Image (cartoon, rainbow, N blue to C red):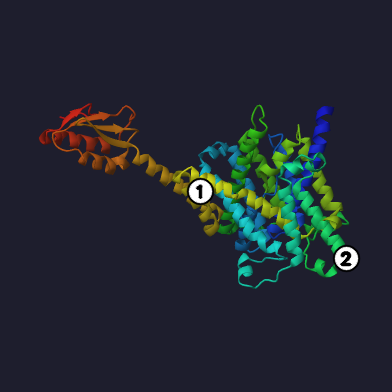
Amino acid sequence: MNLSTLRQDIPAGLVVFLVALPLCLGIAQASGLPPFAGLLTGVIGGLLVTALSPSRFAVSGPAAGLVTIVVASIATLGSFSAFLTALILAGVLQCLFGLLRAGRFIALVPSSVIKGMLAAIGILLIMQQIPVAFGAAGDVELLSLVNGEFQFSRSAMLVAGVGLVILWLWTTPLIKSVKALSWMPGPLVAVLVGCAATVFGDRLFPALAEGLPRITLPAFDSMSALVAELETPDWQAWQNPTVWMVAITLALVASLETLLSQEALKKLRPQNPAPSPNKEMFAQGIGNLTAGFLGAMPITAVIVRSSVNVSVGAQTKLSILIHGVLLLICGLWFSNLLNAIPLASLAAVLLYTGYKLATPRLFIEQIRMGPQQYVPFLATIGGIIVFGMLAGIGIGIATQILYSIYKSHRNALQLTRHDGHYVLRLKQNLTFMHNPKLQGLLAEIPENSVVVVDNDNAEYMDPDVKAVLKDFGENARERGIRLSQWPVAVK
């Protein structure tokens, strides 16, 4: 490390910290967990995972994409301590994935399913955060707003609305052109404005400030107080089969999101040699193993913080380590300042994050690419929303496989007519599943015809396919059909 990289890494670490702070707090709040759990997750990701990761630029921490899994899993298992047991098991599975070099299998997941997963996460995140933006302080479902069972808070709606406007403004050329403003992350500005509303609201408009729920971070006056705040795993829960299902879901989705972030990061800032996906999964596994022991949240590499790290000129891992240290300092000694953050501001940050994951442009792009792309895309979204993350991804992959098989079989064989000659083109290798299509085409050939077979692209045919062709060839003479270039010997 030389002085020039130090000059770039220190400011980069500060900016990444400013981006990560509201996201760590907001993701924890959205998951129904104490905000300190989000900070602790950011610290583990920023320090431990970074130390083990082969990537110089990937930032790990709590991810918005896992919020819905965390909420559903805790509800299913009945306690956060049982969830922590599942998180430890997920970490072990990720370590095994890395040791078994399973990272290469990321290429087998269709892009339509990956985009559908991200869009579904965005939709669920929006559905979850709308009640918070309207003033909910606890677990309130979106349906309660429609049924009229919810008391709206004008101050929360105002803070959330202003936060969303700020986040939008920070993407416009107007703000980007002002250097004094462009270095300030939009989420941080939205949170600071929300803090101003609570601080000045308490003094000037107490009635409005009362309707503005805030985060609650504990103050630690000793190491024993810190240890007492940490949740411990339920070691008996490993015998519950549901815990293993949650662990498998966490391991697969967290690994998938991490590897997708790495792939996206390669396009932003290539590394030579490229970071090993297997070593990255092992590092993430150690991180989640530690998070489960300490009472934190699931960890993944996140593209938003990673892209910020690259865009502000980070050169080494030092920038990520600095961001982790700053999160730790904030959680231990500045909890009173953080307690001024309203939940509505964090809801605005997460609503905007959900919108970016499920932007209308994404749906339009998928539809324009045709049914082979948008059918699995929509199937993945519907499956995740209705049945959960793992089942939804399975439904999307199954839909893509079935649709690909259908299109492949439909275009594998073609029968055309040229000047009294029928040309049967075999466009690919044929299996027994092509027999119905093959038999249908052969039945269309009339008597007293000449049949030419073009099988240059078919290097393999199942015995069942050869049997169909042989039967047709043996009966062709009786029907006055002459065969040319017939791929199967006819006696």
Residue 204's disc is 2
What residue sits right under mark 1 in the picture? 377
Above or below — where is 204 with respect to 395? below
Quarter of the N terminus within the rendering:
top right
Q: In which image quadrant can residue 157 be found?
A: bottom right
Disc 1 to disc 2, C-alpha distance:
50 Å
> Which is more toward the observer, 197 or 95?
197
Q: In which image quadrant can residue 8 be found?
A: top right
> Which is more toward the observer, 432 or 413?
413
Residue 278's disc is none
Residue 270 picture location, percent across and down: 66, 30
Residue 321 picture location, percent across and down: 78, 40
Residue reaching furthest to the front: 174
Which circle's residue, 1 or 2, is located before the other in the chain?
Answer: 2
> Which is more toward the observer, 363 or 78?
363
Q: Note whether residue 430 is visible.
A: yes
**475 on left or right of 243:** left
Q: Identify the residue at horizontal 67%, vertical 40% (top origin).
A: 283
> Which is more toward the observer, 369 or 433?
369
Is the C-beta separation of discs 1 and 2 under 8 Å? no
* Element on which disc 2 rests: helix
* Element on which disc 1 rests: helix
Q: In which image quadrant can residue 198 be found?
A: bottom right
- Identity of the amino acid at label 1? Phe
- Identity of the amino acid at label 2? Leu
